[in-house]
Amino acid sequence: MRLHAFTCGWLDGPLGNFLAGEHGRLRVPVPCFLIEHPQGVVLFDSGLHPQTQHDPDGRLGVVAKVFGVEFAPGEEVTARLAAVGVDAGRVRYLVNSHLHFDHTGGNQQIPNARLVVQRREWEAGHDADQIARQFYYPHDYDHGHDTLLVDGEHDLFGDGRIVCLPTHGHTPGHQSLRLRLDSGEVILTGDACYLRRTLEQLHLPSVVDDPEAMRTALLRLRALRDAGARLIFGHDPEDWASVPALMT
Ligand SMILES: [Zn+2]
């Protein structure tokens, strides 16, 4: 199994959004991950929508007032996949950690995949109150994909190598992805853990759907790390510099 890590843009926003109460700003990567499994190609999150490259205000509305966007042509998910020899039409499963714009923006460009989302996230993403409260944009994820809604842990190919891990809290149905590579276990935390500091200090962001659930998820991620897993965080610029483009 091969794990490719790449960015689909960078965001620049208030540090307090990532670590409640902190001042200043932070420039963060928008990571996506491609996993080549013997039974098919899996994408974990899809980055920003290509429209964001030339029209961030039109695409993101109020969110563009909070975050600056750096996203150049050639950094969109389809180009990133092509660069490692994978046609976007060949992706079998598109696993979304959650439905925020920087994780689902490229979904439209992955036409043939089966979408894998936690049921409670999908339901929140189709509830008018939750859409407003969680800053979801249905135009990121409502593209008629065949959808596999899962409840809790889900082993994608039944061999224990790619497993969805429920890490609710950031949003109602957030999930991380646990990978068993030949070199060891890797956890793609997604936004269950923005930064290494989030994990070390249990320092939550300013906007959290369910703080108690998020703390529980962080403790679970810590336990996995302590058992030897490598964690790749959701938006940590320092940690990102040490993430290899390819892991096997
Ligand atoms: Zn995010």
Image (cartoon, rainbow, N blue to C red):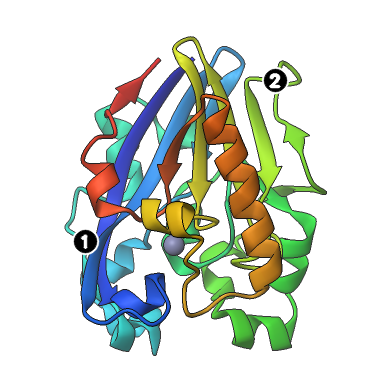
Q: Relative to residue 133, is residue 98 depicted above or below?
A: above
Identity of the residue drawn at 32% across and 84% down: 66
Where is residue 83 drawn, in percent x and y? 25, 31
- Above/below status of 175 relative to 198: above
At which x and y percent is residue 71?
21, 61
Q: Residue at x 51, y 28 (%)?
A: 229
Residue count near mark 1 (Cα–Cα under 10 Å), binned few <14, some 14–19, many ≥20: many
**Alpha carbon separation for disc pair 1 and 2:** 35 Å
Q: Using residue 236 as the reference point, say whether residue 43 is left or right of it.
A: right
From the viewer's perspective, tell me whether residue 39 is left or right of residue 64: right
SS for tag 2? loop
Question: Which residue type carries mark 1?
Answer: Phe
Residue 53 shown left or right of residue 105 in the figure: left
Residue 11 location (% of width, % of height): 27, 67
Whichever of callouts 1 and 2 sits on the residue coming sooner in the sequence is 1
Q: Residue at x 47, y 53 (%)?
A: 199
Other residues around mark 2 within 10 Å, as few (<14) / some (14–19) / many (≥20): few
16 shown above or below 183: below
Q: Which residue is mark 2?
A: 160
Quadrant where the C terminus is found in the figure:
top left
The quadrant where residue 159 appears: top right
**Residue bearing mark 1:** 71
Front one among 128 and 237: 237
Q: Are marks 1 and 2 in contact (CB under 8 Å)?
A: no
Q: Is residue 92 visible?
A: no
**Residue kind at label 2, given as amino acid type:** Gly
Q: Nearer the viewer, mark 1 or mark 2?
A: 2
Seen as rendered, the residue at the extreme right is 151
Task: Give percent across and percent down for residue 91.
Answer: 52, 33
